[in-house]
Each structure stands twice: as structure tokens, then as C-alpha cells.
Image (cartoon, rainbow, N blue to C red):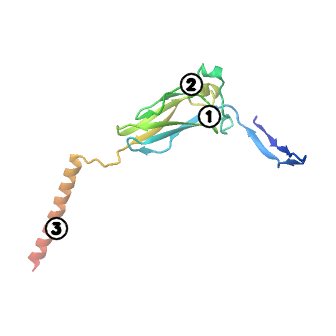
Amino acid sequence: MSNTGNAIATYTNLNGTVITSNSLPVTCSKIAAKYTASYDKAVYAPGEIATLTVAFTDVDGRSAADSLTSAADNATNTVAVISISGVTKVGAADAADDLRTTNGKLTYTFIVGQAEGSFANSISFPQVNTNGALLSTGAVTAPLTVKSATATVSNADVLKSIVALIASINKQIQALQKLILKR
């Protein structure tokens, strides 16, 4: 059952007049029961800044409530478990890596490494996995690809292009020979 209702705000001016707002529907989200993670881009160049966003939802599929943990919880299992490759976290991991979300989301900033390739980083929030035992699938992965902005050409690619150029020149020579022989 969700916590929903209507809210009306009133304000009394210094002269005693009362201002009343319209009735607004409000919904209170529940604690996080599931989460997803994704980077802000699919492909990065070495040295770029990558932002990982983890979005939390409650059992009803709405954005989860913010500030979900207490100081006592921080001592247990609310800290994020993030296994990363291809990137380096900006700043050290600390107790703030818990469920103190903003609008149901957490963001992490990384510096993309120099190694090119495809990487899949694992993100897990044990407390959420416990909260949403029936919904959560446990750790999630966030893929990213690192490609150099400058094109790299292998010797095999150069050789292939040279062979194709020679074949094209040979075809043109044969066409010219046929044209000369017809005259």
C-alpha cells in the first residue's frame, strides 16, 4: 500500500490574511528494493570523465525514498560494493557510499583508463538486496567501452589497402589495353 494523499499549504501574512494553496496530490516513496546502474555514455576516450548513475526504485516501481539509512545502518551492510575495471573512482570510497540518494539516485565519477576495450563493472548494494529480496536480482552490471579518439591502423590493414589499390590499377590498365587494341 502506498502512502498517498493530498497536501494543502497555508500561510498567514503579518496583516492576518491567510493564503491557502490548491490541493496537491503527494506520494511518499518506500525504501529502495531494486536498482539499476548505467554510465552517461556508451563509449569513452581514454582520460575522459565517466559518470555512473545508480537509480533506486521501491517495491511499487517508483523512485525510492531519499536518505534511506541511519548512522547505525552505515556500520552494517549499506555500503556500496563496486567492482570496476577500465576506470578509476574520483575520490576515495567512504561511508558516504551508502543509500543517501537524491531523487532516488546516486552518482559516482570515474576517470577512464588508457586501456582500450569493453568492460562490465559490477555494482551491489547489499542492504537493498535484503530489502527487496523478492524483487532484487543482486549485483547489477554497467558496461562501458573505451576507444581511442585517434584511429589505429594495423600493418594488415595497410597491406590490404595496398593490394586493393594494385588490383584497381590492374583493372584500369586492362581496360586501357582493350581500348587501344580496338583502334
* Callout 2 amino acid: Ala
* Mark 1: few/some/many CA within 10 Å (<14, 14-19, 20+): many
* Numbered disc 3: secondary structure: helix
Mark 1 vs 3, N-terminal side: 1
Q: Are marks 1 and 3 in contact (CB under 8 Å)?
A: no
Q: Is residue 165 above or below residue 59?
A: below
Quadrant where the C terminus sits is: bottom left
Left or right of 9 in this view: 167: left
Circle 3 packing at 10 Å, graded few (<14), some (14-19), many (20+), is: few
Q: CA distance from mark 2 to mark 1?
A: 13 Å
In the image, what residue type sits under mark 3?
A: Gln
Q: Nearer the viewer, mark 2 or mark 1?
A: 2
Q: Position of residue 163 (x, y in %)?
A: 18, 55
| Mark pair 2, 3: CA separation | 71 Å
Q: Amino acid at mark 1?
A: Thr
For this orientation, the residue located farthest to the right is 16
Total residue callouts: 3
Disc 1 marks which residue?
101
Contact? badges 2 and 3 (CB < 8 Å): no
Front one among 61 and 113: 113
Q: Nearer the viewer, mark 1 or mark 3?
A: 1
**Residue 172: which disc?**
3
Task: Indicate the position of residue 21 as horizontal and vertical percent values.
Answer: 82, 48
- Specify few, some or many for label 2: CA neighbours under 10 Å numbering under 14, 14-19, or 20 or more: few
